[in-house]
Amino acid sequence: MGEHRASEALVARAGRVIPGGVNSPVRSFRSVGGRPYVVARGAGPWVWDVDGNRLLDFVQSYGASLLGHAHPAVVSAVREAAAKGTTFGAPTEGEVLLAEAIVARVPGCEQVRLVSSGTEAAMSAVRVARGFTGRDRVVKFAGCYHGHSDGLLAGGGSGVATLGLPDSAGVPAGAVADTVVVPFNVVPELDERVACVVVEPVAANMGLVAPAEGFLAGLRSACDAVGALLLFDEVITGFRLGEGGAAAHTGVRPDLWCFGKVIGGGLPVGAFAGRSDVLSVLAPLGPVYQAGTLSGNPLATAAGLAVLGEAGPDAYRDLSDRVARFGAALEAVLDAALEEAGVTDPTGRRLRASVPVVGPLLGISFVPDGSGGVRDFDGAAASAATGLYGRLFSALLDRGVALAPGPYEVAFPSLAHGPAELDLALETAAAAAGAAFAG
């Protein structure tokens, strides 16, 4: 990057009026070092900071921007919706159309309730599960992040892990007393006290960790055996893996879903969804209360519909193919740089690069030779502890490529990342890795 004085000045100003200078902790760069860049604008796969530096952006608002930044269809939809009014606190056609679009695309999903964030979606879905089953216990997996509501902030990945926090101060013991945290990729033993099992069907908050063969099907069977509900948190994977999300990708159908990111086209949105008999416990039909003034916001529904209208089967297939080729090439580039530098772990084993790809999702981790890659949160934590991600992040950023500023995050190539941009990223990675890993 070139000059960054304007970013530094704005970060300093922010620190005086915003806690930590940021509105989401990972943006602070605490785990990767350096100072945050402040974005002025974006277009397609690029962002420009307030100093005028252009960055090839693999953050893409942590997956919300499937089409890339400022896509004309999204901009046009938001502009048209805004001209009619930005919020009403009353039903609108757009929320019906978005709910219909979600139901039409996701196998087994029958009804949708729109909210304003992924956190709100997850906490509401858990409340529905408890209300439907009459049970209190929730089982979640170490390293899976389901937002920052008290009851789900136990054993979270992503920003919580990045900051080195085991959970969070301010969460009373009683709030997590009925939350059981178990290892990812291992089917837990359940009993009749469990209301639901909540899982990221493809874990994307401890790097990228694919479900092991039989894991999700095993969860489905275990829930059925004891009358518990299976909840897929697809805030990241929903409409990112493909039109039908993880249910279509894996063939396993949950009872409840959480969605976000893509369905808002870059505007604040969330949704929880599921079988109609399960959701019938929601007010005004049933005794489970949930509400939101801005739920179904007309700007967000317009943007989300625009994105879903642009992203058909061919687009998903082409993007997944591009990312698969890119991921394999990137792993080779990073691994060659590690070998050239002779990087080893404390026991003397050679460290290798692992770049897993699931659909269009891509992760970067560093594992001992012969380990087979990261399968759970312990493996993700060991990769983060090498410090190699932070060194690579900084070297890439210096050369104009932006990854997420935390080793537990994943990369989100968008439909705007064409072959030319991915080739540029590979060329940049070769130079950056050599500098990052040397010495």
Image (tube, rainbow, N blue to C red):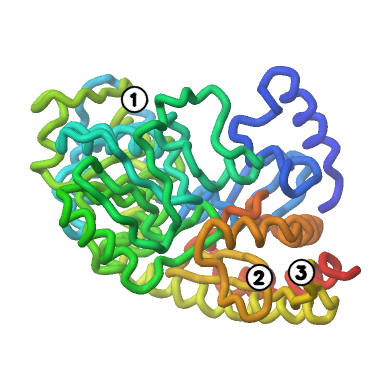
Q: Which residue is mark 1?
A: 294
Residue under the point 76% across and 23% down: 13
* Residue 223 drawn at (x, y percent): 21, 54
Front residue of this view, candidates 329 and 177:
177
Is residue 286 something that shows in the picture? yes
* Residue 320 drawn at (x, y percent): 44, 72
* Residue 58 drawn at (x, y percent): 60, 58
* Residue 298 drawn at (x, y percent): 31, 32
Indicate left or right for 342 with 41 as reference: right
Residue under the point 22% across and 38% down: 129
Mark found first going from the N terminus, 2 or 3? 3
Badge 1 density bin: few <14, some 14–19, many ≥20, Cα 10 Å: some
Front residue of this view, candidates 352 and 186:
186
Q: Quadrant of residue 149?
A: top left
Would you place residue 123 above or below residue 164 in this image? above
Secondary structure of the residue carrying tag 1 is: loop
Mark found first going from the N terminus, 3 or 1? 1
**Does the CB distance between marks 1 and 2 fall below 8 Å?**
no
Amino acid tagged 1: Leu
Q: Which residue is mark 2?
A: 367
Pair 3/1: label in front: 3
Mark found first going from the N terminus, 1 or 2? 1
**Does the CB distance between marks 2 and 3 fall below 8 Å?**
no
User: Disc 3 and disc 1: Cα gap in Å?
Assistant: 50 Å
**Does the CB distance between marks 3 and 1 fall below 8 Å?**
no
Secondary structure of the residue carrying tag 3 is: loop
